C-alpha cells in the first residue's frame, strides 16, 4: 500500500529540491535533496548502513517545515535484532538488572543444580554466547552490569550471584547494588542495556517475569536520563565478590 505523503515545503524556491514530506499515517518524515557523494565526506559519517543514501539539506528546511510536535511511537525490535546489538556497539554495553527473578533462568539445568544445593557446573553452558563475549572483549569492548539485590537476596538473585563468576570469566564486570540504596537514589525499576551512551534497549517483562519484547530508545534526552541512572548506580555499587563473601559468612 502506498504511503499518504503530505508536501510540507521546500527550501529552494520553485525548483522543489530539497523538500520535505510527512507520512500522514506513521508520522515519518521523507526528505530529498542533493546526495552527499564525496568519499572523504562519506567516510566521516557514522552508522551509515548499506542501502542508505546521505542527503544534504539546509537547516532552515527542517526548522521551517519539520513536525513541531512529535508523538514517540515505541520502537520494538525482535530478539534476533536485539542479539545483534552486542556485536554492533563500539565500546561499552552496560546493564541494570532490577528484578527479583527472571523466569527464563528457572528453565535452565544450571538453575536446577542450584536449587538442589549442588555446585553449579558452568562448563560448556551457553558456549556460543561465551565465545561471542570473549571475542568482543578481545576487541577492547566492555560489558558491565549492576544487579540490584534485596535483603535477604531472593533465590533468583542468589542464582545470578553464582552466575557472576561465569560471566566474569568471559569478560563481563559484575557489581551489585542494595535495593534500599537503589530506592533511596530513586532509580527506576526498569531493566535496560545502555550501548555507547547513545542507545537504550529497554527490556519489557510481563507479570510472570518473562521477557516480552525490547524497545529501542535513541532520543538524546531519554538516553541521558538512563546514563544518569547508570552513573548513580555505578557510584554506589560494589563488586559481586563482596556479596559472595557476605553470603558465605552468613552460611548461605
Image: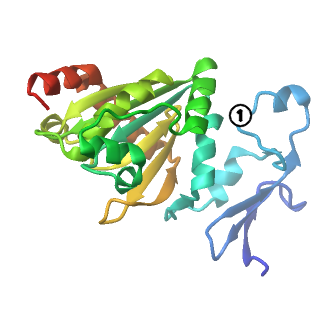
The residue at the point 61 percent across, 18 percent down is: 138
User: Which of the 4 image quarters holds residue 39?
Assistant: top right
Q: Against 91, is 111 above or below?
A: below
> How far across and how far down the image is residue 136, in percent?
61, 26
Outermost residue toward the left in this view: 250
Q: Against 234, is 99 above or below?
A: below
231 or 72, nearer to the observer: 231
Q: Against 240, is 227 above or below?
A: below
The residue at the point 38 percent across, 60 percent down is: 210
53 or 79, nearer to the observer: 79
Q: Quickly name the residue at label 1.
A: 46
Outermost residue toward the bottom in this view: 1
Left or right position of 170 against 35? left
User: Which of the 4 image quarters holds residue 113?
Assistant: top left
Rendered-image quadrant of the C terminus:
top left
> How far across and how far down the image is residue 51, in percent?
84, 50
Left or right position of 42 against 156? right
Left or right position of 152 against 5? left
* Mark 1 secondary-structure assignment: loop
The residue at the point 74 percent across, 45 percent down is: 58
* Number of on-image labels: 1
Rendered-image quadrant of the N terminus:
bottom right
The residue at the point 39 percent across, 42 percent down is: 110
User: Which of the 4 image quarters holds residue 41?
Assistant: top right
Amino acid at each position: 500500500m502506498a504511503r499518504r505523503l503530505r508536501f510540507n515545503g521546500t527550501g529552494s524556491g520553485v525548483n522543489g529540491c530539497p523538500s520535505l514530506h510527512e507520512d500522514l499515517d506513521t508520522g515519518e518524515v521523507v526528505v530529498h535533496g542533493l546526495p552527499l557523494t564525496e568519499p572523504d565526506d562519506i567516510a566521516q559519517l557514522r552508522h551509515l548502513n548499506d542501502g542508505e543514501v546521505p542527503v544534504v539539506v539546509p537547516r532552515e528546511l527542517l526548522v521551517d517545515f519539520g513536525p513541531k510536535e512529535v508523538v514517540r511511537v515505541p520502537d520494538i525490535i525482535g530478539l534476533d535484532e536485539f542479539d545483534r546489538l552486542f556485536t554492533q556497539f563500539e565500546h561499552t554495553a552496560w546493564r541494570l538488572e532490577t528484578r527479583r527473578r527472571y523466569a527464563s533462568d528457572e528453565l535452565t539445568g544450571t538453575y536446577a543444580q542450584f536449587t538442589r544445593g549442588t555446585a553449579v557446573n558452568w562448563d560448556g553452558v551457553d558456549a556460543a554466547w561465551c565465545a561471542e563475549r570473549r571475542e568482543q572483549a578481545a576487541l577492547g569492548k566492555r560489558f558491565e552490569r549492576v544487579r540490584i539485590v534485596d535483603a535477604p537476596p531472593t533465590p533468583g538473585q542468589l542464582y545470578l550471584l553464582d552466575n557472576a563468576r561465569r560471566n566474569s570469566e568471559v569478560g563481563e564486570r559484575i557489581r551489585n547494588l542494595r535495593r534500599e540504596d537503589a530506592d533511596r537514589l530513586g532509580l527506576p525499576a526498569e531493566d535496560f542495556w545502555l550501548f555507547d551512551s547513545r542507545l537504550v534497549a529497554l527490556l519489557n517483562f510481563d507479570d510472570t517475569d518473562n521477557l516480552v519484547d525490547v524497545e529501542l530508545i535513541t532520543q538524546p534526552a531519554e538516553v541521558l536520563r538512563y546514563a544518569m541512572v547508570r552513573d548513580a548506580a555505578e557510584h554506589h555499587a560494589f563488586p559481586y565478590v563482596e556479596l559472595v563473601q557476605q553470603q558465605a559468612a552468613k552460611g548461605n
